[in-house]
Each structure stands twice: as structure tokens, then as C-alpha cells.
Amino acid sequence: MTPGDVHEIPLTDQIRLLSGADDWHTESVPRIGLRALRLSDGPSGLRVPDDHGGSLPATCFPGAAVLGSSWDRELLGEVGGALAAEAGVQGVDVILGPGINIKRHPFGGRNFEYLSEDPLVSGELAAAVINGIQGRGVGACVKHFAVNNQETLRLCVDAVVDERTLHEIYLAAFETVVAKSHPAAVMVSYNQINGVAATTNAALIGSLLRGRWGYRGLVMSDWCAIWDRVASLDAGVDLEMPSSHGAFDRSVAAAVRGGRLSADAVASSAARVAALADRISPPPVHELPVAEHDALARRAAAAGTVLAANDGVLPLAAGSRVAVIGAFAVRPRFQGSGSSQVNPTQVSGLLEALAGKEVEVRYARGYDPEDHRTDAVLVAEAAERAAEADAAVVIVGLPEEMESEGYDRTALQLPAQHDAVVRAVLAANPHTVVVVCSGSPVALPWADRAAAVLLAGLGGQAGGAALADILVGDAEPAGRLAETWPHDLSEVASDPYFPGTGSMVQYREGAAVGYRHTTTEAITPAFCFGHGLSYTSFEWSRMALDATDIGAGEGFSVTLTVANTGTRAGSDVVQVYLADRTGVTSRPRRWLAGFAKVRLEPGQSRRVEVEVSSRELAFWDTEEHDWRVPSGAFSVEVARSCQEIVEVMELRVADGVDHAPERAWTPLVAASDESFAARLGRPVPSVPPARPFTAASVLGQTRAHPVGAAVHAVMVHRCVDAQADPRLRRMMQRSVDELPLRNLPSMSGGLVPVEAVPLLVDVLNGAPDAILRRSLGGVGDLGRGLFERARSILTRWGGPQD
């Protein structure tokens, strides 16, 4: 079978190929040799449904936030290869991941699934994962395209973002991935972008992704994101997932017959589905390599664990008495909730893993992970245990229900009982190590009093074993932060605008995301982007540029010698930042332009080269709608973090541009309507009113109406499994509450016909005349009689609701 064979099958079969066969499979056409493909969630490990409402066992690797903090392309390629091997065992053709949305705000509910706040780190590391997956014959699907940075009203929220910020921050990682790894599929997100849904956004998919970037793979929808199949096909979305059981097939066929949609568009999308099937060839793996992959997950967890502070207490001395405090030491917090939740092959806890180490351990629970109230008895026991020890290790973090797909966080603080335990233990023993397990930043008001702070993230199934290795020095904490950890929300530029008002969120902070904001405003956060300590010491020397004068279309490289001057093997990350001194346009104080990770034995040194492409010098010109490199001077900053600059060298660029559009000079944070409008190049849009209801209104808003309440109840019954994990139930409940009426055909699997949506809107708005004329018009006297009778019923039952 070749993709060309698809053109030989009837239009109805071509249309059938453009929607899933069920929740996790594409359609097949046996007579032309086209097989079905099996898809699986997979950012942290495969989630293949079993026959009992759960999922098959798979290795739960560290979350993307931990992998991002490794800054290790080679390691992420290994993880990708392992995911592909497990796909081969479980019959999976396409893994839905990695996720590369930018971490705009610490409260983002899926931040644990994303790699970084920085587009360069996100793009480079995601490309490594994808190359690892696809190098073994399995497809990868990068997601969520695009500007999908919150869970609140995620199914319909309109992200209002200016053109320059869109390209420089939110699209750049996707462009890198397309160029460097050619993913088999791209998943389009639920949200709107500047008033146009991502799934119907021809400028985003057709002009940019397929046109400018030259992407030739498959574009699929996020699950139930399609609401106008004709418009989405016209925009370039090939595959609707999951199956809507033919809900849109009639409208697509009618659009082709009526000339509103070209037959070539349908055939081309069907051919891309066929081409994907032709491209995929999973590896012939017959048994899950449990021990091998658990060892890789353990190594990856250590590689992404960040030693944020250390006065020398770590690694713990052999033979020391250690108080281990915190329920997470026994029942580890190792993954986030939602579609990425994995059924792990095994799980190691910190307390269990320390049993084989050369330390004497005593344990105190410290807190109840299911109860956020402070238990004075548990706190007192923890302090007593700490006072008796040479050193104390307190493991705290966010409970499982606080981080999930489907809803955002609402506070930066840890639960009060966690903070209370930390303070009590710090008072009892100055040699206290605090381990923080969370998928995104939290406030650590006591951090400067701790002897050491380890930011372990969500370390996957082997995270407990990795922590034990780190604490005693059997492994190094090799991570460097890929996101900023603020003291409080005043240090987060997007906070006044997150998660928005009504169904709109305005990206007024522009490029002032994470470290781009803190370095520009000279803010010292709790822990900065790129920060991480080591158990050994490194010396950098002989730093040089391969050229100090370049043309606007040229890149350059930085070379330096990195030497391990300590007594332990260890890893270091060389970070290269740029600062624009040309004066052509306003830009952040600095931005990351290249990086390299190097591991050295004691006494070993190596010459390291960091390549910087010409694109990293460029800004997005909103008049030319293209990248432009300014002429003049740049500072090239070789650094250990965005705040620890080791060497500054000057680079001069010739033959670039010497001016930029006036709107390029608006401040990074456009707090006023005037400055935001100047950046947008148009008036600031108004938040849509809640009434009257439209097809974009969400189901939860309609519950005061009897019909809305009935539809809501049906959808809850259909979509929310009362027996499911409580976190998944909460996610699905929120999905139903925030479901736009226009998405009912997709989410109901075709139970609600497409034609019923405008009727439902009319009912909810109390417009019985409009409903009945649409339904009964043209049927003579019988129709008029039915009209009058039904009108009186609807007026009593379905009138306007306050």
C-alpha cells in the first residue's frame, strides 16, 4: 500500500479515515492494505488501556519537568528509545508526546508535563526525545500546538498574544522540533489564538506549519477538540481523535459536493493518514525490559534533580544517623495526574531505598499526605526524631490532587503542614536537608535556613531510589533548573493576567517569561533558571569565540575548557546567553542561545564547543513578518546560570537591519491598554459576554436552565467514571463543566448531532419561535398547529433564565 492508493477509494472511505475508529485507533481499509494505528499517551511512559478500566504496566519515567532540568540531549534520546521499545511490546504505533508548551506561570496545571520556560531548551530536548522514539520505528506526536499554557477553560479559552511574542516564545520550540526531528505527528490544541480556534487556524497550520516550516507529517486534534470538521480540514487538520462515530461525516461530504471544501483537501489528509501507517514500524520487542528501564529511569531522575543549596551536609557521611521525615518517603509522589498517568512496573520509596545504604535511618511520618491540616503530634514526633540524629532529611511537596491536567493550581505555597514540619525540624537540627517533590515551583520561605535543598520534581517510579543514591553520594544531583523558582507571585510577570477573565487570557507580559523577566528587572528569585550545584568543582578557562565579526546570516560558536577540579565525577552545563547592544529593538536583558552538558571524571578536562545559530540573534519583525538580525554589538555571556556570568565577550554583526517597527519598542510588560494595543497592532479585544449563550458557551454556565442541566447530567454520566481515580474524576468533571456547546458532538461521540447545537443554543436563550420555525417550517397546517402547541410548552419550560 502507498499513500497514493488512497486516491483510488471512494470519497466516503476517504472521509472515514479522517476520524479515529475508537478512542485509541485509526481506521483501516483492508482492501488497499491500510492497517489501523494504535495511539497511546506517553509523555512519562505509555498509558495503554487494559480490560479493567486501568492501563497496562509500563515504566514511569521522570516527568518532563525533571527531564528538562537534566539539559542532557543524549539522555533524553535514551529515554525516547526506551519508550519506543515499550511501544513495541504493547503494540503502540504512535506515542502522544513530548509536550513542549512554555511554562508561562507556575500555576499551569500541566507544567510537570512540559520541559521548560525557555523555547531553546524545550525545542532541543524535545527533538532529542523524538529522535530517540522515531529512531526505533515508532512515531512521536509533539503537542500541544499552540499557545496552550493553562488548564482553566482550556477547551475554549482565547489566548490573546502579539505576533512577536507568539513567534519568539510560543512557536519557537515547535519550529525547532520540526526542523531537527521531523515528528510523525503534531497535535493541535483546544484553545483559541487571537479569536481563532487552533483546530480551524489555517494561518497556524497551513501557512506556518506546512508552508513556512515545510512540515510534511500528520496533524491531529487533541481529544475531542474538533467542532467544525469542514473548517479544520480546510485549515490542515488531518485526523480527528478520538472517533466521533461519523458525527461530522455528512457535513464534510456536503461541503465537498457544495464546493466549500475541495476534494483534494480530503484526499490529501487521507493520504497523510496512510503515509503515517506506511512510515511506522515498531521494534520487535517481546518482553518489557523492566529492570533495564527502571535503571534508566533511576539514572534520569538523578540527572534532573537539582541541588539548589548545600553547606556541605551532602552527601551524607557514611555511618551517620539520619532522621528521614515525611510520608512521601514511604508513599512517594512521583508523577502528575491526568492523561500522562502511568501504571508503573514498580515503585521505589526513599525509605526503602536507604535501607541498603551505609547510614543508620530512623523514620517519622511528619504529616498525613491525605490531610492538609497540621497535626501537632506528627510535627512534634518529627522534631524529636531530628534532634536525635546527625542529620535530618525532610521530604515535602505538593499532594497529588494539586497538580493535574484539567485544572490549574491556585497557590504557590506548600500545604501548611509541610511547612510546619520543615520549620520544626530546622529548629531541632541545623543539619537538615529538605527534598521538594513537586511538578512545578513552590514557595520555600525557610530555604535560607536549610543546610541543603534538593529539588527532586516528580522523579518517576525510580525517583525514591535516585534520591537515596544522591543523598549518600552514589549518584550526583546533575540537574540545572529549566524554570525559575520565584519567592512569591510578585516576581512572575504573567501573574496579573493568569488565567484570564471570562474566556479570554491576555499575554500582556510578552516575552517577560521566567528568567527573561527577572534578569531584565534585576529580580533575584529564590532559585534562578540554569541554577544547580554539584558534589565536585569545575574550572572554566580559555573561553573564545570562533569569530568576533559575522554577517547577519551567520552563526558562531563558543569554545572553552572545562576541568573537573574536585574529587568526584560530575556533570556541568555550559550556558551561553546573548544580550543585544545594538539599540535596534527592545529585548529582554538576556536570553539563552546555546548550551552543552559535559560529564568528567576527577582531574579530567575537555574542550567544549557550544554552537549558536544565527536565528538566536534574530527578532521577529512584525512589519516584514519574518526574522531579522540587527546590525551592531552583542554581548556573548558564558554562564553557569542566568545570574552567574563567568565571561563576557563582544560579537559584532554586519549587514543586518538598523531599525525595527515602532511597536517593537513597547515595554516588555504591556500593563496598560494603550501599550498592549500598540504591541498587538489593533485594539485590545473585549471579553465576550456570558449572555446570550452561543456555541462557544461552556456547559457549566448553562446548568441554571433545565435543558442545560439535563445535557450536563448526560455528559457527566457519559464522561465521568464514578469508579475512576479521584484525580481523574476531578479532571473529567472539569472537562464537562468547561465543555463548549460546539464541542458536544465530539465529546459525546456523535450522541449529540452537529445540527442540534444551534437548536440547543436557541433553547437556552429562550427563543422558541426560532427553534420551531427551523424545525417545523414548510410542513403546512400540521406544522403550524404543532408550532403553536410546542411554542406554549417551550415558553413555559424553556424561557430565559437569569
Image: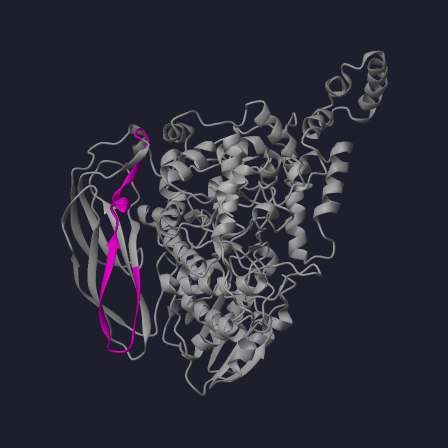
The answer to whether residue 597 is magenta is: yes
Rendered-image quadrant of the C terminus: top right
* Observer-nearest of 261 and 407: 261
Q: Position of residue 179 (x, y in %)?
A: 36, 48
* Observer-nearest of 266 and 430: 266
Q: Residue furthest top?
A: 781
Query: Considering only vertical position in the picture, is 376 above or below 581?
Result: below
| Tally of numbered tags | 0
Residue 54, quarter of the rendered image = bottom right
Q: Residue at x 55, y 24 (%)?
A: 260
Q: Position of residue 483 (x, y in %)?
A: 41, 55
Q: Position of residue 169 (x, y in %)?
A: 38, 43
* Observer-nearest of 560 and 180: 180
Q: Is residue 86 visible?
A: yes
Q: Residue furthest bottom?
A: 319
The answer to whether residue 579 is magenta is: no
Query: Considering only vertical position in the picture, is 567 above or below 571?
Result: below
Query: Considering only vertical position in the picture, is 526 above or below 735?
Result: below
70 lies left or right of 686: left
23 lies left or right of 427: right
351 lies left or right of 616: right
Q: Position of residue 588 (x, y in %)?
A: 31, 44
* Observer-nearest of 465 and 498: 465
For the record, the magenta segment spans 596-624
Q: Is residue 27 visible?
A: no
89 lies left or right of 729: left
Q: Residue at x 36, y 76 (%)?
A: 312
